[in-house]
Image (tube, rainbow, N blue to C red):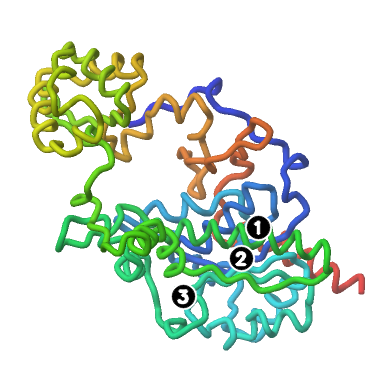
Amino acid sequence: MPSPTPPSAVVAPPSPTSLPLTGIRVLEFTHMVMGPTCGMILADLGAEVIKVEPPGGDKTRKLPGLGIGFFRSFNRNKKSIVLDITSEEGRDTAAELAGQCDVVLENFRPGLMEKLGLDHATLSERFPKLIYVTHKGFLPGPYEHRLALDEVVQMMGGLSYMTGPAGRPLRAGTSVNDIMGGMFGAIGVLAALRERDRTGRGQEVQSALFENCVFLASQHMQQYLMTGEAPPPMPSRVSAWSVYDVFTLAGGAQLFIGAVSDKQFATLCQVLGREELLQVPGFRDNASRVAVRPQLLAVLGEILAQHRVEELTPRLEAAGIPYAPIVRPEQLCDDPHLKQSGGLVPMATDDGGTTEVVLLPLTLGGRRPGVRMPLPKVGEHTDEILGALRQQHATH
C-alpha cells in the first residue's frame, strides 16, 4: 500500500476567493473522461461546477477494469445533483438551472441534447450570455455524426501508427485524447468568458477527439510536408541523436539515457569510466555516431549491463545527463517529487474513505490549485441547488 502523504508535503491550495474562476457557475452534463476533465479543470480553478447525474448516478462511478479510476480522477471539486432529463419536469428544471449558470458542458452522443431541448441553439435563445461547450468525436464536417472513442481517433489520427512498431499500430497507454479534449474545452471556456466580457454574449465551444489527435500528430504531418518522405513509426525512426534509447542494466533494470550533444556524450563516457570511446574515429561527433548508431548502442549496451541502476543514476544526475527509469503507474503513488511538490494529495471519497489524487500540472502564483471538497455522493447537493431554485420561484 502506498504510504500516506505527510501533511508537511501537501501544498495548501489557494483559498476559494483567490482562485481565478471564483464566481463562475458551470452546469455539467457529462460522463466518462472528456467532459468530466473539462469540468474538473474549471472546478479546480475555482468555478462552482454542478454535475447532473441520472437517477441511480453516473454509470462511470461503477466502471470495472481500466475504467475503475475514471470517476475519482476527473470529478473532484464538483457538486452532484440528480435530475431525470428524459422527463419533461427534469428537462424544464435543467433548462432553468442553465439560465443561472455561465457555462454548460456536455459530451453525449450527437443529437441527444438537441432531442432533449437542452442544446446550444435552444438554450442560447433564452440565455444569450450562456457559454455552451460540446465535447464531440469530430468537429463539423463529413465525420461529425460518427461515434468516436479515444482508441478510434488514435487509429484515425496517426497516433497509433506512430506509437507502435511497423505493421503493429498501438494505442497510447492512457486516454490522451479524452483528457486533452477536455483541456481544449476548458481553454475554449476561458476564451469565451473573456470575449463575453467585451461583447456581453456567450457562444458555443466545440472540442473534438479526432482534431485533438491530429493536433498531436501535426509535427509528423509537417515533417512529411517539408521532406516529402513519410515519417516512420517512432520505434523505427532515425534518431537525431546517437544515444537516445532504453538500456538494460545489471539485474534486468531498464533505464532511458539521452546524450544529445557531443559534450553530453563525452560526459557519459567519463561517468562510465570509458573515456577511450572518445578516441574511436566513428564516435567523435554526433553526426558520425548517428551513422554508426547500431554499433554504438551495442557497445554501450554491453558496458551498461555491468552497472546497477541504483549506483548509476545518482552519477548521471550529478553529471547532468538526461535519464529516466521506466516507471509503472503504481510506482508513482510513492514518487518523492510528486509528494513533496504537492502534486499528489489526499481527497475524501464518496464512500467515506480517502484516496490520493493527481492535481493539475500547473501553479498559480506559486501554489497548486487543490482539493477543496470531498468527491460528491450521488445527488449529494440536489436539495441545496434545487432548493435554492425553488426559493427563487417563491420570491418571484
Amino acid under label 3? Phe
Mark 3, secondary structure of its residue: loop
Of the two numbered discs 2 and 3 in the rendering, the one whose residue sits closer to the viewer: 3
**303 horizontally vs 195: left or right:** left
Q: Which residue is mark 1?
A: 49
Identity of the residue drawn at 22% across and 36% down: 245
Tell me if residue 129 comes above or below residue 223 in the rendering: below
Q: Which residue is mark 3?
A: 138
Quadrant, the N terminus: top left
Image location (x, y in percent) of residue 250: 11, 22
Q: Could you tell me if the residues under marks 2 and 1 are in contact, i.e. CB atoms within 8 Å? A: yes
Front residue of 332/264: it is 264
| Residue at the farthest right position | 396
Q: Label 3 crowding class (10 Å Cα cut-off): few <14, some 14-19, many 20+?
A: many
Q: Which residue is mark 2?
A: 28
Identity of the residue drawn at 37% across and 69% down: 149
Q: Could you tell me if the residues under marks 1 and 3 are in contact, i.e. CB atoms within 8 Å? A: no
In the picture, residue 386 is in which quadrant? bottom right
Front residue of 320/18: it is 320
In the picture, residue 25 is in which quadrant? bottom right
